[in-house]
Image: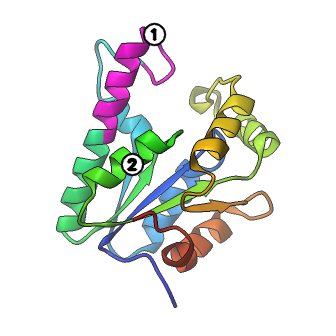
Amino acid sequence: MITVETLDCLIVTGMPGAGKSTVTRLIAERLTRSARLDGDFVSRLIVSGRVGPLGSPADEAARQVELCNRNLCTLANNFSDAGFTPVIDWVIPDRKQLDFFVSLLPARRVLFVVLAPGIEVCQYRNTLRDPRERFYFDGYEGLDADMKRELGDAGWWFDTSALTPGETADRIIREARHHAPVN
């Protein structure tokens, strides 16, 4: 059976509501030695002066996204060096950011999984979240089109619309090394 291994770095991305947080948590729990690296958590380490990825000014938002990406990769390398499989949960919307991750993870096989249950499913799942955890976002169509254009040939675009989070996690663990390498 093909499985995620320690020298792999698994990145799970997708639109808000795709199931990234739930699925990465389940994956990390199922692996023998793993670390779940949540991009939202890392970006919120900035307490004063934080500008979110879609915030303004745009140049500061971009600078903070790059800082978060660097921190995620540094953590991934450190955990991997210590024998833990890093499982990254973060929205990677374009090729430039994916290439940046790959460049900062040179000693790792990067497995890139795009959870792609469809816009309607993502919007519905977002409404099921605790109100404090909902992501208020009206750009689903644009993000979906951009991700397909920029990343449509990268990694594994995994339609999870008919799967439970547990089924999704199990399939990623079994099949990501076969379907999702980007380097």
Query: In 3D space, how far apart are the residues under numbered discs 2 and 1 (Cα atoms)?
Result: 24 Å
The picture quadrant where one finds residue 129 is top right
- The residue that disc 1 covers is 56
Q: Position of residue 99 (x, y in %)?
A: 39, 48
Colour scheme of the rendered structure: rainbow
| SS under mark 1 | loop
Please tell me whether the stretch drawn in magenta is mainly helix, strand or loop.
Answer: helix
Give me the residue at 47% from left, 73% from top. Answer: 30
The residue labelled by disc 2 is 99
x, y (%) of residue 97?
A: 42, 41
**Is tag 2's residue or tag 1's residue first in the polypeptide sequence?**
1
Splitting the image into 4 quarters, where does residue 36 fall?
bottom left
Indicate yes or no whether the magenta region holds residue 58.
yes
Cβ atoms at labels 2 and 1 below 8 Å apart:
no
Q: Which residues are magenta?
A: 52-69
Indicate whether 106 appears above or below 178: above
- Given the image, on which type of amino acid does mark 2 rest? Asp
Number of the front mark, 2 or 1: 2
**The C terminus: image quadrant:** bottom left
Answer whether residue 23 is visible to the viewer in this image: yes
Crowd around label 1: few <14 · some 14–19 · many ≥20 (10 Å): few
Residue 46's tag is: none
Q: Viewed as shown, does residue 66 lie left or right of 26?
A: left
Q: Is residue 48 above or below residue 71?
A: above
**Which amino acid lies under the numbered mark 1 shown in the image of this protein?**
Ser
Q: Is residue 129 in view?
A: no
Q: Tell which of 109 and 47 is nearer to you.
A: 109
Q: Residue at x 59, y 74 (%)?
A: 170
- The relative height of residue 111 versus residue 173 in the rendered view (above or below) is above
- Residue at (61%, 28%) from the top-left corner? 135
Q: Secondary structure at mark 2?
A: helix
| The stretch drawn in magenta includes residue 128 | no
